[in-house]
Amino acid sequence: MNFKKSRKTPAKVWMFIGTGFVILTAIVIGCKVAQNSVGNISLNPFEPYKTWTQYGGGADQSKYTELDQITKKNVSQLKVAWNYPTMDNIEYSFNPIVVDTIMYLLAKNNSLVAVNAITGKELWIHAGLNGITRKGVNYWESKDRKDRRIIFSLSNTLQEIDALTGKSILSFGDQGYISLKNDLGRDPESISRGASPTPGQVFEDLIILGSAPGEGLFSAPGHLRAYNVITGKLAWVFHTIPQPGEYGYETWPKDAYKYVGAVNTWGEISVDAKRGIAYFPLGSPTYDYYGADRTGQNLFGNCLVALDARTGKRLWHFQTVHHDIWDYDLTSAPQLITVKHNGKNVDAVAIATKQGFLFAFDRVTGEPLWPIEERPVPKSNMPGENAWPTQPFPTVLKPFARQQVTVDDLNPYWTKAKMDSMKKIVAAAKSGLFEPLSDKYNVISMPGATGGANWGNTASNPKKGMMYILSKDHASIYRLTKVERPTAAPLSAAATSAAQALYAQSCQSCHGVNREGSVGPALTNIGGKFNADAFKLLVSTGKGQMPAFAHIDDASMTSLYRFLGGVVSGGGFAGGPGAGGRGGAGGPARPATAITGPVVATGGAPAAVEFNSQRATKAMREYPAGVQRFDEYTTPYGLSNNDLVSPPWTSITAYDLNTGTIKWKKPLGHDARIPLMAGQENLGVPEGSQRKSMIVTSTGIVFATSKGGFLYAYDADNGNLLWTYTLPKDTDGLLTTYQVKGKQYIVVLATRNYTNESINHSKDLGALPQGYVVLSLPNKKK
């Protein structure tokens, strides 16, 4: 058993009692807004399950609402109340938040926009926030409601904007920002990435953050941090890679904390606000697929960790994968629910994993609700690699995803030629949930690097003990290759082949087969445009229409850069210009675009602009003195065959955690290229659940999005499909629901381009422009 409780867990857990707030009239400086009556302002803007003032709806990340206007009987009557076009071609993943009658969203070339939540009318625009966390922002206000702040990461800084005026709060931190390269136990000038792609969680006067430092060799550690929202002062830090004298240090080689990176929360954080406990899903250590330099169990890699939200003190943890060499990060939001267990009400926490497992615990003590077994798994044949001999398996909760691939599982809709070819590949490979990777043969992991459940993919009815999971059965085909040390010499054949595969998988659809450009610009002479650092930052954080590819490790990124014509020298980087503009994406700054509307500020805190333009000048290149250096092995993420197995490729699964059973499971969406037979269920969509989300209502509806540009409403009790809505573009990010003046709204963001032009709904007659689609029921006839 690998559950561990802190030796110093306090006997008494402090309770947090919410305080009512004074009702104020909303004022927006520079905008003429009608005064709100008492009925339009929430007495408690953080009222659980009634508001959406935080990323994910609230601290517990349940995505659950007790707004009850939309029911099973009338959901099919939902119509567009208003829409807000983003006025650009950027693919956003933003979760709008709503405070009183104001909605905050991201649009217009990464501008933060405040709009009237009833009409969509713009109130203010803070333009040009290139590099802002694209998944969302968070909100804090003082008890008297006079001080209201929007909190967000921008490149490698944490910043705040006045929620009423839209202007930067320059009293926060150092002239309006704090550096997220600090407080990680490494030289800040050696760190290229310190921010998180998700906005963290607000608890009392703290903003609690994860990070995404990268997954390559010598990436920074992903320590958990909390900062005071008023001053920006560091409140606490929890070392996810323990330092000498700390719990878990013995699960690593000596001095591993000096060179091992990641073990970070880049997904969603959940907080039990009453008890003051924060729950963090942690990722794997670097390297993802080869751990010869980190022999041991590697705490707190792949752990669900419960910390005292006020102090950062560890209360308990559970490790879902020991010594991870499969990139089985925990990323989905831990679900805080109350269940009936052994005749008693138990406040529980449940975590869904990439490998398709669901684990459930008493959220206070960390004790598993049902037994978890340590079972033997295969050994590794890689030099220096000591795969952990056992891994944890739930005994009662059945997996929600497939975990093995054979030739009998292959996609029956393939052509005969492809089927014959893939049968040979699968027959010659090894497959299994914890089959170690090798450089001698292919290994098929099922689910793979992006399979199972990921961020945004979990929701619950916390009062009924029901949990809902979006997942995909997406296998990865891996083969390790030795990493070449940086050199100006040509790439080897193996490295060239790997880079070609990565380009075909991640870049080719936009930049063309021969890099001549199509949807995206040409990638010829890349070395003359970007140096290696700038290229890595651009690809990992995204820019404009290009999404972020944060999962690509440094070695693969370097090979891709060299494949595209960049030059990397052994002693440092050689190539084009420096890291570029403040957006954190590197390269030449995007030409300024005129933003129409009530622009009140541009670019965030002025002092942060120069800071964010600086690149890492002391990047770590070698192990510390006295540490043995191993050869380095890596692999692409093996995601080119997203439809390797037979359908359904994506599913929505409902667990009753009162009994530990799957209540129902249904395919999520349908691949429109495959006609359905009469009476046949949907088949799901390859990659259909990635970056998608749900809302669970007290009226018995589960709203869910899927690849293909659809919003679905399922019956929460049995999974029956109640309603389908076609969006103008594909959708990413979390849904939002809120209520103003007695009317409930659902917000869905539709800005992602369709990968299959034959189902491009943006060309439909009367289609809305890309942007935010706000739905509500028609007004009742008087």
Image (cartoon, rainbow, N blue to C red):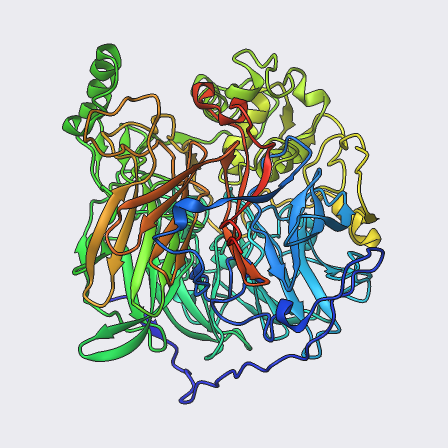
Left or right for 108, reference 11: right
Q: For residue 411, which quarter of the picture? A: top left
State whether residue 618 is above or below residue 64: above
- Frontmost residue, 275 versus 727: 727
The image quarter in which residue 251 lies: bottom left
Q: Is residue 416 above or below residue 294?
A: above
Q: Residue 184's spot in the image, x, y percent?
A: 60, 60
What is the x, y in percent for residue 622?
A: 57, 44
Taking the image as drawn, is residue 142 in sight? yes
Closest to the observer: 258 or 731? 731
Q: How many marks?
A: 0
* Residue drawn at (55%, 81%) of the image: 18
> Residue 357: percent from the left, percent from the top?
27, 53
User: Which quarter of the image is occupied by the N terminus?
Assistant: bottom left
| Residue at the left extreme, as displayed | 408
Q: Toward the viewer: 712 or 508?
A: 712
Residue extending farthest to the bottom is 11
Is 705 left or right of 463, judged from the image as shown? right
Q: Quadrant of residue 613?
A: top right
Q: Foreground: 707 or 679?
A: 679
Q: Is residue 180 visible?
A: no
Q: Position of residue 76 (x, y in %)?
A: 39, 45
